[in-house]
Image (cartoon, rainbow, N blue to C red):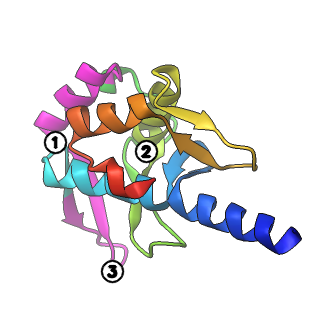
Amino acid sequence: MDSLNADTRAKALLRARLCYDHLAGRLGVALMSALLADGVLAAEPDPAGPDAAYVLTAHGHREPTAFGVDTERLPHRRATVRYCVDWGERRHHLAGALGAAVTTRMFACAWLRRGRYRRVVHLTDAGREGLKATFGVPADDLV
């Protein structure tokens, strides 16, 4: 029974989880990809290393605001847009003040609910519909 629980937990963590205060896993990577594809974020070369640095575009200020995240009121004590390399997907997911604010708003909208296991989150039916309509995330194959 323990190996079944461990396998269930591992699959849930890969699918969708919290990485500190922002969304990670396949769902977090899909959100980041959708924000880049829609022009909410743009990648710029990072002079400090081989990875890209991401910036919020002019369009990017409007879309999160329409979702209920006021990009002008994000805390200034941390970078607005950061990324984390997702350990399961080996791709970037959205971190920073924007990543935290979007994740908080997703919980407030009941798009996400906490799972049985620490850090695991589950996408609700409302979240699946909302992510597709709001951000263009095809969430059907992520859950």
- The amino acid sitting under disc 3 is Pro
User: On the picture, is 25 further left or further right than 91?
Assistant: right
Q: Residue at x 82, y 74 (%)?
A: 3
User: On the picture, is 93 further left or further right than 78?
Assistant: left
Q: Residues within 10 Å of mark 1 (few under 14, many from 20)?
A: some
Q: Residue at x 18, y 26 (%)?
A: 62
- Quarter of the picture containing the N terminus is bottom right
Disc 1, disc 2: CB below 8 Å?
no
Q: Position of residue 42 (x, y in %)?
A: 18, 54
- Residue named by callout 3: 50
Q: Residues within 10 Å of mark 2 (few under 14, many from 20)?
A: few
- The amino acid sitting under disc 2 is Ala
**Magenta stretch?**
43-70
Q: Is residue 73 above or below residue 132?
A: above
**Mark 1 or mark 2, earlier in chain:** 1
- Residue named by callout 2: 79
Quarter of the figure with residue 83: bottom left
